[in-house]
Image (cartoon, grey):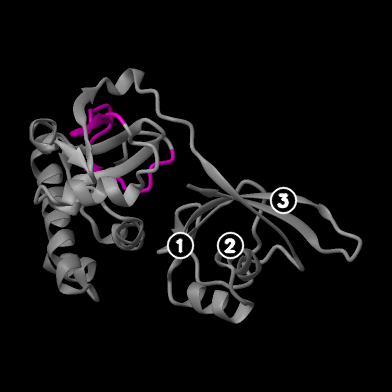
Amino acid sequence: MGLSDKNRFLSGLNEPERTIFAKLYDRAVRSEKFGGASFGDFLSMDELALLNERSRYLPECVLSLSGGFDGAERKMPGFNAEGEDFPLTALEISGKRLNGLTHRDYLGALMGLGLDRHKIGDIVVGGSGAVVFAASDIGDYIVNTLGEVGPCPVQVRKADMGSLDLAPREFKDIKGTVASARLDSIVSLMAGRGRSAACELIKSGRVYVNGSPSQRTDMKIKDADVITVRGLGKALVEMGGLSKKDRIFVTLKKYA
């Protein structure tokens, strides 16, 4: 460990990324030197991929991740945090006439409070409200300050993480057939664009398979894989049988 390792850890990052990752590195150093757990803020899928790529340059400490529930996309890194509670909280947002509100509505309302995006994890939207995962140090502020989402008055309360009952995921089915189970074929169906446009999305780094970035257009996709296209959403892949023309029936259960 040393300055050269930190330089390698930060190499090639843009300025906002360097700020975030420099803090992470320093927290890892603190855990190694003094013992005990140290935690960062929530990271996006892009940032998590960068952290995974650069983890070999971190000090000798155990890296773990938590987003508050299985399947979370945004996760908080912890160093030497085995057996420790991560400093995150779940907040239930409820109210009348919340049907039709989207993830964007809830995120916009939270950002309107002047919060740092990295203090907020996933937002799970249901018909009667949403559950927001947030850093513990801003939980009380959100409870006491968030009064409306869009035009709708809301109430916010802290939820018991141990007995949290998340609303079932809502899906929109996209059905079609593909010539082969390649990533570019699946992305083409999901995005409603041609294969060349799908290839551009993949090569530009906007596509993830099961949470990991992939720039391989010919990557083989399996039943139950989860495909995320940044800016277009996320879908669970269900592979079917073959058509009379030997094309594969596919249903993409796109997260609403």
At horizontal 9% and vertical 51% (from top left) the residue drawn is 114
Question: For mark 3, what is the residue?
Answer: 239
Please state which of the two labelled residues, at mark 3 or mark 1, is closer to the viewer.
1
Q: Secondary structure at mark 1?
A: loop
Return the residue nearer the eye: 188 or 50. 188
In the displayed structure image, the side of residue 248 where residue 80 appears, left or right: left
| Residue interval drawn in magenta | 71-96
In the displayed structure image, the side of residue 55 where residue 25 appears, left or right: left
At horizontal 17% and vertical 71% (from top left) the residue drawn is 7
Query: Which x, y percent locates residue 170?
Result: 50, 40
Tell me the CA gap for discs 3 and 1.
21 Å
For the N terminus, give its image quadrant: bottom left
Is residue 119 shown to the viewer in this render? yes
What amino acid is labelled 3 in the image?
Met
Circles 2 and 3 in contact, beta carbons < 8 Å:
no
Q: Secondary structure at mark 2?
A: helix
Residue 190: give its label.
Answer: 2
At horizontal 13% and vertical 36% (from top left) the residue drawn is 142
Question: For mark 1, what is the residue?
Answer: 232
What amino acid is labelled 2 in the image?
Met
Query: Which x, y percent locates residue 137?
Result: 9, 36
Name the image quarter holding residue 149: top left
Tell me the CA gap for discs 1 and 2.
9 Å
Query: Which x, y percent locates residue 106?
Result: 27, 45
Residue 92 part of the magenta segment:
yes
Q: How many neighbours does mark 1 have within 10 angstroms: few (below 14), some (14-19), or many (20 or more)?
A: few
Report the label total: 3
